Image (cartoon, grey):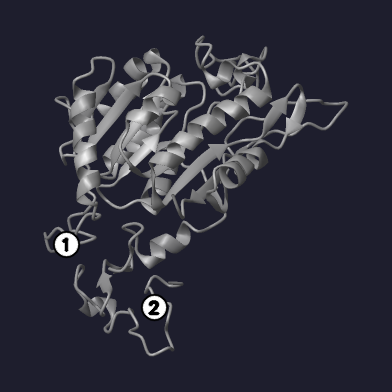
């Protein structure tokens, strides 16, 4: 897998090697090049048909195992910055691409500006997003999804690029296999959501559905079907309510403050103590655990922050919750570097204070019920 040719892990043991048997110049994209390998071109490499986790080639998979990612912006991220804690589409697309196959179901219990659902719509995955703040849903999430879904859909994202020979290669050959009982549960869920005025159900040109549920995740997660992946970034306690605690809108070095998440007392961003915050987060992630299928992954994106003016190892506490309290297997930390963030003179010239220009992507695996 080190050069994109996707060597079989058992090379040298007598099992079949999945490397192409001929040079790329003599192999058509989409052609089977070994017992398990399908050639997808010089840029992508070989897709191994035994891959049950995602739709990536060995070359693509390997790049996403790096312990440091650099955050990438695109033009469609602009609207998301109306939210106090936005995420970028390409960053979430990497995670969705790594941990799911086409057609699988992704959950974000703190969907915020809707980036997770936009990434799902673009990548032919189905999504469920839960958001407490109705204004975020109506002003940000729905408008961001409409170019990909619903009656106003204008953009058809084709996961399979048109090639020079005018053919379209479908990779992998089939979408993920979902057990029939889970397929039926999901169908019933989509029907239920479509009947409830407070929620939104949008369907893409490819048939993939995105559900936006308005309300408290502590209540709504009981109503969703089994999921294939969860990716989320919970509120960072009450740091946005600190005086001057927000981030700029004009790229200046002056801290101007931004709107906090909501005034709802059940919002994790409004809880008085850090202990209450961790307890509420544990309660919600326990419900996520119940809905996550065995053998599937969950990623939590979090940064350390100050509690009572003291730097706190928040990501360590989250790992403890997910691993020790809930029983998930910790699979590692990816540093999401955000080097474009402005720097502020915290403590200068008297005391060292850190500027956080990265977040932690903490990934976990559910190995048993």
Residue marked by disc 2 = 8
How far from the left and from the top, in percent, is residue 199? 28, 20
* Mark toward the start of the polypeptide (2 vs 1): 2
| Residue at point 70%, 33% (across, down) | 355
- 141 relative to 242, above or below: below
How far from the left and from the top, in percent, is residue 250? 54, 19
- 12 relative to 227, above or below: below
Q: Compare residues 279 and 168 and report the one nearer the observer.
A: 279
Q: For the residues carrying marks 2 and 1, which lies nearer the camera in this image? A: 2
Residue marked by disc 1 = 164
Q: Compare residues 130 and 118 and report the one nearer the observer.
A: 130
Q: Residue furthest right?
A: 350
Q: How many marks?
A: 2
Residue 44 marker: none
How far from the left and from the top, in percent, is residue 67? 57, 55
- 149 relative to 50, above or below: above
**In 3D space, how far apart are the residues under numbered discs 2 and 1 (Cα atoms)?**
29 Å
Residue 203 in view of the camera: no
Q: Residue furthest top?
A: 263
* Secondary structure under the numbered disc 1 in the rendered image: loop
Residue 8 in view of the camera: yes
* Other-residue count near label 2 (Cα within 10 Å), few / some / many at <14 / 14–19 / ≥20: some
Left or right position of 254 against 194: right
| Residue at point 12%, 64% (across, down) | 165
Left or right position of 314 against 220: right
Q: Give the quarter of the image for residue 131.
A: top left
User: Is label 2 in contact with label 1 (beta carbons under 8 Å)?
Assistant: no
How far from the left and from the top, in percent, is residue 9? 43, 77
Q: Compare residues 86 and 297 and report the one nearer the observer.
A: 297
Left or right position of 219 against 187: right
Q: Residue furthest left?
A: 166
């Amino acid at each position: 897998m080190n050069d994109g040719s996707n060597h079989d892990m058992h090379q040298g043991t007598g099992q079949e090697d999945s490397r192409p048997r001929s040079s790329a110049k003599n192999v058509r994209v989409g052609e089977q090049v070994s017992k398990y390998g399908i050639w997808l071109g010089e840029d992508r490499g070989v897709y191994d048909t035994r891959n049950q986790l995602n739709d990536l080639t060995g070359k693509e998979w390997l790049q996403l195992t790096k312990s440091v990612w650099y955050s990438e912006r695109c033009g469609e991220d602009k609207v998301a910055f109306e939210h106090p804690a936005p995420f970028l589409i390409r960053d979430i697309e990497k995670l969705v691409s790594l941990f799911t196959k086409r057609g699988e179901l992704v959950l974000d219990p703190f969907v915020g500006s809707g980036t997770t659902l936009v990434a799902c719509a673009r990548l032919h995955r189905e999504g469920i997003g839960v958001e407490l703040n109705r204004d975020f849903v109506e002003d940000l999430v729905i408008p961001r999804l409409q170019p990909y879904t619903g009656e106003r859909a204008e953009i058809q994202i084709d996961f399979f690029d048109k090639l020079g020979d005018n053919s379209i290669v479908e990779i992998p050959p089939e979408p993920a296999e979902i057990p029939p009982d889970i397929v039926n549960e999901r169908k019933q869920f989509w029907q239920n959501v479509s009947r409830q005025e407070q929620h939104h159900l949008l369907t893409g040109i490819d048939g993939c559905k995105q559900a936006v549920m308005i309300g408290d995740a502590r209540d709504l997660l009981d109503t969703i079907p089994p999921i294939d992946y969860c990716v989320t970034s919970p509120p960072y306690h009450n740091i946005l309510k600190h005086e001057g605690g927000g981030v700029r809108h004009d790229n200046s070095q002056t801290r101007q403050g931004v709107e906090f998440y909501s005034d709802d007392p059940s919002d994790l961003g409004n809880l008085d103590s850090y202990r209450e915050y961790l307890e509420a987060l544990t309660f919600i992630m326990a419900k996520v655990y119940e809905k996550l299928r065995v053998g599937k992954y969950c990623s939590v994106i979090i940064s350390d922050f100050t509690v009572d003016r003291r730097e706190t190892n928040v990501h360590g506490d989250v790992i403890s919750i997910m691993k020790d309290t809930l029983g998930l297997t910790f699979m590692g930390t990816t540093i999401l570097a955000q080097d474009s963030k402005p720097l502020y003179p915290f403590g200068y010239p008297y005391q060292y204070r850190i500027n956080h220009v990265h977040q932690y992507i903490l990934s976990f695996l559910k190995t048993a019920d």
